[in-house]
Image (cartoon, helix red, strand yellow):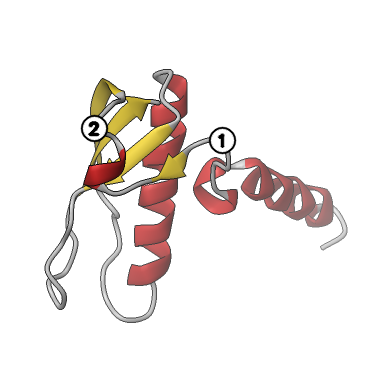
Amino acid sequence: MRAALPLIAGLALLGCNDPGFRGVPEVRVAQENEVASCRAVSIITNEPGLYGPVLGEEALRYARNKVLETAKADGADTVVFDETPPGVPVSLVRARAFDC
């Protein structure tokens, strides 16, 4: 068990540094009407990977944060996520990235 402690601690630290878990504060989420004067950079998609009432929301948050990370890497500072109708499970996160 003692030999596994450094491995567990290392994995925990990796999780803390993963933008999927911690978010990307340099990129803001906006609505369509807020990006009219911004330059379009890219369209980004990501699949949540897990579904259901237990882990689905965490997987969706992780996928959205990974979209924000990709937007930052593409040179964007703002993201507009496509709307999903209430009650419909999200199988694909799609967003447009902008430089405002």
Q: Is residue 35 left or right of residue 4?
A: left
Q: Amino acid at mark 1?
A: Glu
Tag 2 secondary structure? loop
Mark before the other along the chain sequence, 2 or 1: 1
Residue 99 is tagged as: none
Q: Residue at x 28, y 26 (%)?
A: 37
Q: Residue at x 87, y 59 (%)?
A: 2
Locate residue 33: give its quadrant.
top left
Q: What crowding class fits label 1: few (fewer than 14 Cα within 10 Å), some (14-19), or many (20 or more)?
A: few
Q: Residue at x 12, y 68 (%)?
A: 85
User: Most extreme residue toward the bottom, as rendered?
Assistant: 53
Q: Nearer the viewer, residue 57 or 49?
A: 57
- For the N terminus, the quadrant is bottom right
Locate residue 56: give its quadrant.
bottom left
Residue 69 lies, in percent from the top left, at: 46, 34
Residue 43 lies, in percent from the top left, at: 21, 29
Residue 13 lies, in percent from the top left, at: 73, 47
Q: Is residue 37 above or below residue 92?
A: above
Q: Is residue 21 left or right of residue 92?
A: right
Mark 2, residue position: 36
Q: Amino acid at mark 2?
A: Ala
> Are dots 2 and 1 in contact, CB under 8 Å?
no
Mark 1, residue position: 26
Q: Residue at x 39, y 19 (%)?
A: 74
Q: Is residue 67 above or below residue 100?
A: below
Q: CA distance from mark 2 to mark 1?
A: 20 Å
Q: Is residue 53 left or right of residue 28?
A: left
Q: What crowding class fits label 2: few (fewer than 14 Cα within 10 Å), some (14-19), or many (20 or more)?
A: few
